Amino acid sequence: MNEIEKKIVGQFDVAKAWSHVQHLVEKLPGRYTGSDQERQSAEFIAARLREIGVEPQIQPVDSWLGVPDGATMRIEAPEPIDIPCAPDTGRGQLISGEFIVIETPEEARQLAGKLTGKIVVIPYSYSYPITPEEARKQGAAGMIYGNWGPSDVDILRVTAPQTWTYWGLPDPDAFRIGEQEAIPQAHIGRQSYERVRDLCRKGKVTGSFSANIRSFWGKSHQVIADVGPDHLGDDADFMIMAAHHDSWNPGASDDGGGVAVLLEAARVLHGARQSLRRKVRFMFVSGHENGAYATSTWYLDNHWQALREHAICFSFTDNPGFANAPEFKIEANEELMDFALACARDVVGDEPKINVHRANKTADRGFFGIGVPGIYTRGAFTQAQADAWGGAFLGYWNHSNHDTLDKIDPVNLERNARIRLLEAVRLCSAEILPYDFRRTVAGMRERLEGWQADGRYDVSGTLALARKFAEHLDAFYGPAGTRDAARTNETLKALARELSWINYTYKGRYGQDIFGVDLKKPLPIMNSIDELAHHAAGSPMDLMLRARIRRDQNKVEDALRASIALVTSS
């Protein structure tokens, strides 16, 4: 860090941040969207911003919301067992049938066509072996999620019902699929899940469950505030720093800590605003937990052109400062991975392990289509810890009444916050944006080379374009002194707009993929190539998949040609 960066980052006051967490957890613990406490939370945030000289806006957004309203589950055979559960989706109807466990995508493929009338039981994760919509299409009657956590813990998870079928305020088709046609779903604790799973592995298990979600139209309250040099106008570039202020009771780590980090970051950056070249737009979003990411998606839809022209990064802060979390995790678009890692190392040094991954479709990160790169940096548990907790990489208490103040370590919170602050300072003060698309295209090339070597589908033309683009990028990233900063930044933003949607979406520029879709590998828009392995060559499904792949391949090739044109003309 240079001296200016050290001075700014060093001004983060963890005591001030901790006081914000305490207020949210102790005074406003029930701040789910649609509640009076959620509105009070927005007012609290706005008041704290005004105290530091920043003028916020509270934006009430019409939202379709859902809150839990009771659930039951009972095994009838081979032995009667009443199982505690929590609702996810449903209108209280009693669903009876045989329970069937699916723990892996391979099991889901093996059971394809055999789910009619069944109640599908799966382990909770961010990447399901089978989605509720896939199960519905196959005739399943309902779905049960087994919560993560240690085997001897039976914590019930509270979740948002809508995000498995749509993202943001639903259009009529999404509403029909997500609300009117969705199969009932409920959650059980880890201990109960393992008991049900073991029974199903031994033989036929029958029983029933019900789940009731109270759905309604309501308001999500989002708080927006800009921090930046006094001379910048509305046409200035900006990064977004976001956290969700709605939470399930009490919501200490998720996301009282994130709100506290952003409030303190706003204070620090406002004091240092004249040293920045760009603005920081603080977004305290809502509708995160029980509104399918309502306000951030509304903001994207209704500020599309401003975001397309001027947004440089979507930085999300969620679950920062976990207690007993010795590592860090970075999820970012490839072009910002090296930048984000350098920021983290400059704050925490060489000792902690830092895991760097491609960004995924969670946590209000709905900006892939428009092409705004993102960073999400937080403290992380070791893989051994998560494995011992049934995969609970966000802590087995996540989304439960066990998410209390003791789940945050103020020391870890401060370290996490200083990383986020340094990211913001560098993004908003750098003469040239720190995007490195050579890493982005390298990932694309590797994926395309793998598909070409596999031989199921010819991507040689696409691969040739990717290689050509890589060559031109090497020339584009020549000596920095030879580049005009303003022109280079416009080219870099334009590249992000062209490449993000082919590299991080299935639905393209204007659609929204659902929560947790598989974005682990580059070019997911062409993932149907992998499905060819499960169908005989020349079969009807093989032929239909090839038609889809060709269309998606055209999208990728168009984006690569446009990107080549950008770097060769800049």
Image (cartoon, rainbow, N blue to C red):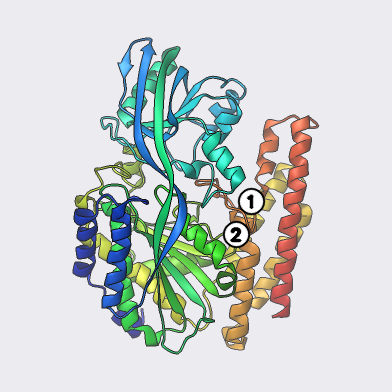
Q: Residue at x 21, y 60 (%)?
A: 23
Q: Earlier in the sequence, mark 2 or mark 1?
A: 2
Image spot of residue 537 (x, y percent): 78, 32
Q: What residue occupies the far top of the structure in this picture? A: 78
Q: Quadrant of residue 398?
A: top left
Q: What residue occupies the far right of the structure in this picture? A: 538
User: Is residue 25 shown left or right of residue 486?
Assistant: left
Q: Which residue is mark 2?
A: 369
Q: Look at label 2 and name its amino acid.
A: Gly
The front one of 518 and 481 is 518
Which mark is drawn over residue 507?
A: 1
Image vertical order of residue 451 relative to residue 422, above or below? above
The front one of 289 and 551 is 289
Q: Quadrant of the N terminus?
A: bottom left
Q: Look at label 1 and name its amino acid.
A: Lys
The front one of 446 and 561 is 561
Image spot of residue 37 (x, y percent): 28, 54
The answer to the question of whether label 2 and label 1 lie on touching residues, with beta carbons closer than 8 A, is yes
Image spot of residue 447 (x, y percent): 64, 51
